[in-house]
């Protein structure tokens, strides 16, 4: 049982929805980024999605593109990203960390070496945007063997015929992408998402977390209510971009978390 | 075992020898050896599977090829001539040089060969909106052209930096009714334009067709674009047989993503006596500073834009910007089939610097009365390097894949000519 599985079991026992927060490792710099990550559990974050910066984030909107660029401009690396997870783990043994990013920095490191390092740093799961089930042998299967969850994205274009394939090697939870588009763009609609969540639920027992296009406490509540939880990324990253203090960022995150937890 | 390096590739070579063909790729996973694949987000995956299905169907549909043949002939002006470059041959004093004149195509480059194929396919799929990325603007112009012809909406993503250095092509695209979107994300070059095109596609999945301009991207694009561009090699083969009664000894083409080269090379892959050479952009020289675009000469395998291939990248797997005087070659990757041909040794890849390309550009103007684009000037520079040492009965076919009108401002600047000065003086 990974930390992610344990977290969902605990949430289920409390009858609570999960609130997942995304931040980019190294944004605005390595030290402040670590402080922000450390503040998240206290702000009500159940699971942390830690962005791994990449020069070419094809699925991300301007907000997260710029966050990655800020991090890279500060010479953020894969090692330093894992370092943030490691430093966080020294103080927090239970909050799961999911590393989210693109394949090339991992491929460049070497998959086997990366998996050992990620596990050792306290990473619990991976969301790698450019690895669909067709490329499962690359990282998904080795990651599962190494004891890391591999969390797959399901999208509005994932039809019934394809859904079993998407769910097949998924573990931890399913990340449902509420819109066709990039992060931080269009607003998710509860009316559109609800039947999709039901459709996925009919084929899996895994928790379903909905993200992309969730920007306010109200939206977090609406979306969390129809799924097992929700993710907010760009709205939080915007606050970091504005140069807000760690305390103010945490206070803002808490409003979102409270929204999701009201559901 | 992670599949990097030559060892794995040699197994491929042995296997191919067994089946005696280099033309069977890609496999069902879209791989050429370890290269290629489908590294895209889940939102796009169903779209590229549908595209693959539709392309596989069209490929064996005679009416599809009849339409292509008709438009290739009457709209593009194919077949393009295979021209014996007599004065160039004399000047270099060695091998006999033929130029495949794809610069004579409508819109001035080979790009339209592929665009026609993809747009006809898009129409069959009922798509009404076409998006494309462009570097030098040649693919953008070709896409805007064919969209105008068929009355389709066209959006072209172009790096803000390239919008500046290729202003004439930007105006052409707008004249043709396309919307040109200057891309400022990332560093504002071709790779960023491709990122933004992918972001558009992921947002507009229902009505939009992404017309990729080179033999890269997720499967089936590398194979599909190659198949459409292979008209170049097919014609060249027939034409050289007619002119010389035999196959060439060497074929040469320039490579950015590698579509004109793949188009020339593919029909010759199994003619093992034919020496195949791809010419990458060496920029200021293939050095540690990465001031070049020679992915095979100076890069290593990685994953970007839907495929595994050789990429310019740093130690941490971050993609680097290339550097080349030629906007069309300014891309940090290369088509996966080239990566495979490189690893198995079927084709040889070399790099030519900006300086060498500029010399070849002038040589071609002087000796043949042909103003070449900067992209094939790289190929010509390599021809100029090797031809003098080769015997007079050695036949070289080089792909003259584009004309140089778009490049005159860049070349004038590089050569120090003041274009506003009618006396033709140089700037000091």
Image (cartoon, coloured by chain):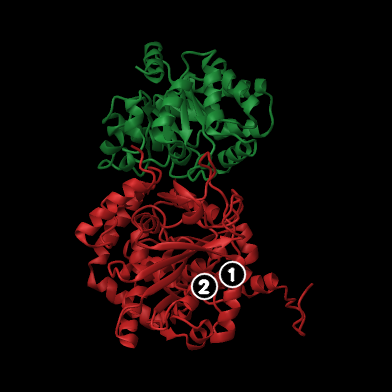
Chain colours: A green, B red
Q: Between tags 1 and 2, which lies in front?
A: 2
Q: Position of residue B275 (x, y in %)?
A: 37, 69
Q: Which mark is residue A113?
A: none
Q: Secondary structure at mark 1?
A: helix
Q: Are marks 1 and 2 on the same chain?
A: yes
Label tally: 2
Q: Nearer the viewer, residue B266 or B19?
A: B19
Q: Position of residue A182 (x, y in %)?
A: 49, 43
Left or right of B362? Residue B304 is left
Residue B417 occupies quadrant: bottom right
> In the picture, which quadrant includes the C terminus of chain B?
bottom right
Residue A39 occupies quadrant: top right
Q: Nearer the viewer, residue A200 or B131?
A: B131
Q: Position of residue B391 (x, y in %)?
A: 42, 80
Q: Residues within 10 Å of mark 1 (few under 14, many from 20)?
A: some
The numbered mark, 1 or 2, whose residue comes first in the sequence reads 1
Q: Is residue B364 above or below residue B181?
A: below
Chain label for disc 2? B
Residue B266 seen from this side? yes
Q: Which mark is residue B385?
A: 2
Task: Report the residue at 54% width, 26% height from top.
Answer: A217
Q: Which mark is residue B356?
A: 1
Task: Report the residue at 40% width, 82% height from top.
Answer: B80
Left or right of B397? Residue A81 is right
Labelled pair 1, 2 in contact (Cβ < 8 Å):
yes
């Amino acid at each position: 049982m990974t930390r992610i599985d344990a977290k969902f079991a605990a949430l289920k026992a409390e009858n609570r929805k999960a609130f997942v927060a995304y931040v980019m490792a190294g944004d605005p710099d390595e030290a402040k980024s670590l402080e922000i990550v450390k503040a998240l559990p206290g702000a009500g974050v159940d699971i942390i999605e830690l962005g791994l910066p990449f020069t070419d984030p094809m699925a991300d909107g301007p907000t997260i593109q710029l966050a990655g660029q800020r991090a890279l401009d500060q010479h953020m690396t894969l090692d330093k990203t894992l370092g943030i997870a490691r430093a966080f783990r020294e103080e927090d043994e239970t909050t799961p960390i999911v590393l989210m990013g693109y394949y090339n920095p991992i491929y460049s490191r070497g998959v086997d070496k990366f998996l050992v390092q990620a596990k050792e740093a306290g990473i619990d799961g991976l969301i790698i945007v450019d690895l669909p089930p067709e490329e499962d042998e690359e990282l998904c299967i080795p990651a599962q063997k190494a004891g890391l969850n591999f969390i797959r994205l399901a999208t509005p274009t994932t039809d019934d015929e394809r859904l079993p394939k998407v769910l097949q090697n998924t573990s931890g939870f399913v990340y449902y992408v509420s819109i066709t588009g990039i992060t931080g763009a269009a607003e998710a609609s509860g009316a559109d998402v609800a039947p999709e969540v039901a459709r996925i639920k009919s084929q899996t027992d895994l928790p379903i977390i909905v993200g992309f296009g969730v920007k306010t406490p109200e939206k977090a509540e609406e979306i969390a209510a129809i799924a097992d939880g929700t993710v907010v990324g760009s709205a939080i990253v915007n606050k970091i971009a504005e140069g807000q203090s760690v305390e103010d960022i945490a206070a803002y995150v808490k409003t979102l978390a409270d929204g999701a937890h009201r559901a | 075992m992670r599949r990097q390096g030559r060892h794995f590739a040699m197994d491929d070579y042995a296997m191919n020898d067994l089946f005696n063909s280099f033309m069977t790729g890609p496999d069902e996973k879209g791989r050429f050896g370890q290269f290629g694949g489908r590294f895209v987000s889940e939102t796009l995956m169903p779209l590229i599977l549908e595209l693959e299905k539709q392309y596989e169907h069209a490929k064996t549909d005679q009416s599809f090829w009849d339409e292509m043949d008709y438009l290739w002939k009457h709209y593009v002006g194919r077949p393009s001539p295979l021209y014996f470059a007599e004065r160039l041959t004399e000047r270099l004093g060695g091998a006999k040089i033929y130029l495949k004149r794809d610069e004579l195509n409508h819109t001035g480059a080979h790009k339209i060969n592929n665009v026609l194929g993809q747009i006809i396919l898009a129409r069959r799929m009922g798509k009404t909106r076409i998006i494309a990325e462009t570097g030098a603007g040649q693919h953008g112009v070709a896409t805007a052209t064919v969209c105008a012809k068929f009355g389709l909406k066209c959006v072209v993503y172009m790096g803000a930096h390239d919008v500046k250095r290729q202003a004439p092509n930007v105006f052409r695209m707008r004249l043709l009714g396309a919307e040109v979107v200057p891309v400022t994300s990332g560093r504002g070059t071709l790779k960023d334009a491709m990122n933004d095109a992918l972001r558009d596609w992921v947002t507009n999945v229902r009505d939009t067709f992404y017309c990729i301009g080179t033999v890269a991207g997720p499967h089936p694009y590398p194979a599909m674009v190659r198949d459409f561009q292979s008209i170049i090699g097919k014609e060249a083969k027939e034409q050289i047989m007619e002119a010389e009664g035999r196959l060439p000894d060497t074929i040469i083409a320039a490579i950015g993503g590698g579509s004109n080269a793949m188009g020339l090379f593919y029909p010759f892959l199994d003619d093992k006596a034919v020496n195949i050479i791809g010419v990458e952009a060496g920029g200021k020289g293939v050095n540690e500073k990465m001031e070049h675009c020679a992915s095979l000469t100076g890069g290593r395998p990685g994953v970007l834009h839907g495929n595994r291939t050789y990429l310019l990248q740093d130690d941490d797997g971050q993609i680097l910007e290339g550097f080349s005087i030629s906007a069309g070659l300014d891309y940090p990757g290369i088509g996966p089939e080239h990566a495979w041909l490189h690893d198995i040794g079927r084709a040889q890849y070399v790099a030519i610097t900006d300086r060498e390309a500029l010399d070849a550009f002038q040589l071609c103007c002087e000796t043949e009365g042909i103003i070449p684009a900067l992209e094939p000037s790289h190929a010509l520079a390599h021809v100029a390097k090797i031809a003098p040492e080769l015997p007079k009965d050695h036949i070289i076919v080089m792909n003259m894949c584009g004309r140089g009108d778009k490049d005159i401002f860049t070349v004038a600047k590089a050569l120090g000519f003041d274009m506003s000065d009618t006396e033709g003086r140089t700037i000091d």
